Image: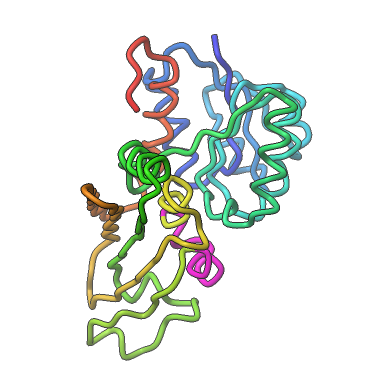
Amino acid sequence: MKTFAIVGCGHLGNIVAEAYKNGLLNGYKLIGAFSRNVDDATALLSGVDAAVCGDILSLIALKPDFIVETASIKLLKEFTPNALLNGISVIPLSIGAFADQNFKETCIKAAEKGKAKIYIPSGAVGGFDVLSTISLMAEVNKKEIKAGIHTHKGPNSLKNTPLYKDELANKEETVFTGTTKEAISLLPTKVNVAIATALSTVGPDKATAMITSVPAFPGDDHKLTVETEGLKAVVDIWSEKSDIAAWSVVALLRNLNSVITFF
């Protein structure tokens, strides 16, 4: 029986917990949860024999096989190296943290030393298998490769960010063009999928990102493209809500415990 714990007990964390309660994670036991708000962790674990942890060190002390993170880049950075050193694999949704090369290298070294892994879920997108395969082929064959993501979203989702302006309510406009690393620095909670795309291809400094604001657009549409000589892949996924990100964690856990594994 594998064990897991959840860090971040908001909407996405609750989806993972509910999937467990509903019997969708056979072969796993949920043993703990941590949130800045203890009441949120208590509510998430309602009906589950698991520990409500008052701090992240208490959760790491439980020694789960996996920690599922649905909180924030800041919190992910706080606990991940320590968890990995303790042999605990991490499944993060705040993937934008890995745009920080120093943090990424620290985590890799910690994972190697602790014999743990970082499992990147598909989040609100997907296709990382074919993106990484094409990137590998281009590298081996010494061919040029281009990779990027184009996101369409409603202007309301850009409020309280440097990209928002009132005029976006009435006109379609491309509000950002640059690298995925630049995108995540501007929008740390909005474009984690861009960093996931970059990590599976050419890296955050080279993968491009474009964000287009569309009046009254519901949810997000993410179009991922990777292209090299003789090969091109396009993955286009629209989601009205963020729930798919949490469900991708559930699907990943099921995949890791399945006799037949999808890649």
Near-viewer residue (96 or 15): 96
Q: Is residue 235 left or right of residue 243?
A: left
Numbered range of the magenta stretch: 181-193
Indicate the quadrant containing the N terminus: top left, top right, bottom left or bottom right. top right
Q: How is the image coloured?
A: rainbow
Q: Is residue 11 left or right of residue 124?
A: right
Q: Residue at x 44, y 80 (%)?
A: 163
Indicate the quadrant containing the C terminus: top left, top right, bottom left or bottom right. top left
Q: Where does the image place residue 86, in percent across and percent down from the top left?
A: 75, 26
Q: Where does the image place residue 160, in percent across and percent down from the top left?
A: 49, 77
Q: Is residue 59 left or right of residue 206?
A: right
Dividing the picture into quadrants, the one containing residue 43 is top right
The prevailing secondary structure element of the residues shown in magenta is helix
Pick out the residue farthest to the bottom: 167
Q: Where does the image place residue 201, in percent across and percent down from the top left?
A: 42, 49
Q: Residue at x 47, y 11 (%)?
A: 27
Q: Where does the image place residue 44, in percent across and percent down from the top left?
A: 53, 35
In the rendered image, residue 188 lying in the magenta stretch gets the answer yes
In the rendered image, residue 45 lying in the magenta stretch gets the answer no
In this picture, is 156 found above or below 16? Answer: below
